[in-house]
Amino acid sequence: MKNGKWIAVAILVLALGVAGVVFGWNLLPTQETAEAKGTYGPWLGTWILIWIVFGMTVTLAGFLFAVGTGKTRGN
């Protein structure tokens, strides 16, 4: 099971991506609060960045899983 490390790291990367989204939900104010304070632009920008990073973690985890299962070769 020499490729098990790739799959384990893929799961870890997915967990970190989910943790980023959960932190965003818990640390950022609601949309209504951001609109009321006049900080909707930065609020929206932060959420866009959070979802971009989440997409990158899913992509990286997919690649790591493919290497671990032998579907592609990691050089």
Image (spheres, rainbow, N blue to C red):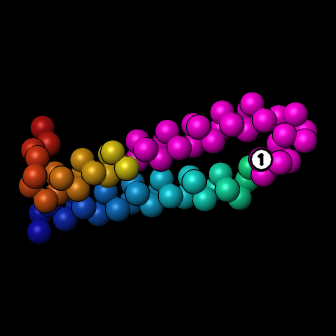
53 relative to 42, above or below = below
Does the magenta portion include 41?
yes
Quarter of the picture containing the C terminus is top left
Number of numbered discs on residues: 1
Read off the magenta span.
Answer: 29-57
Q: Residue at x 45, y 61 (%)?
A: 15
Q: Residue furthest right?
A: 37
x and y percentages locating residue 68 in the rendered image:
17, 57
Residue 14's quadrant in the figure? bottom left
Q: Which residue is mark 1?
A: 31
Extreme residue toward the bottom, this view? 1
Give left or right: position of 39 versus 25: right
Please state if 61 lies on the left or on the right of 50 as rendered: left
Q: Position of residue 52 (x, y in %)?
A: 49, 39
Which residue is at a point 47% across and 47% down the rendered structure image? 54
Check the picture and name the quadrant holding the N terminus: bottom left
- Give the quarter of the image for residue 40: top right
The amino acid type of the residue labelled 1 equals Gln
Residue 51 highlighted magenta (yes or no):
yes
Rendered position, 25 above or below 55 = below
Mark 1: few/some/many CA within 10 Å (<14, 14-19, 20+): few
- Residue positioned most to the top: 41
Write the residue at 60% across / 59% down: 22
SS label for mark 1: helix
Q: Nearer the viewer, residue 25 or 35?
A: 35
**Residue 38: % across, % down:** 87, 33
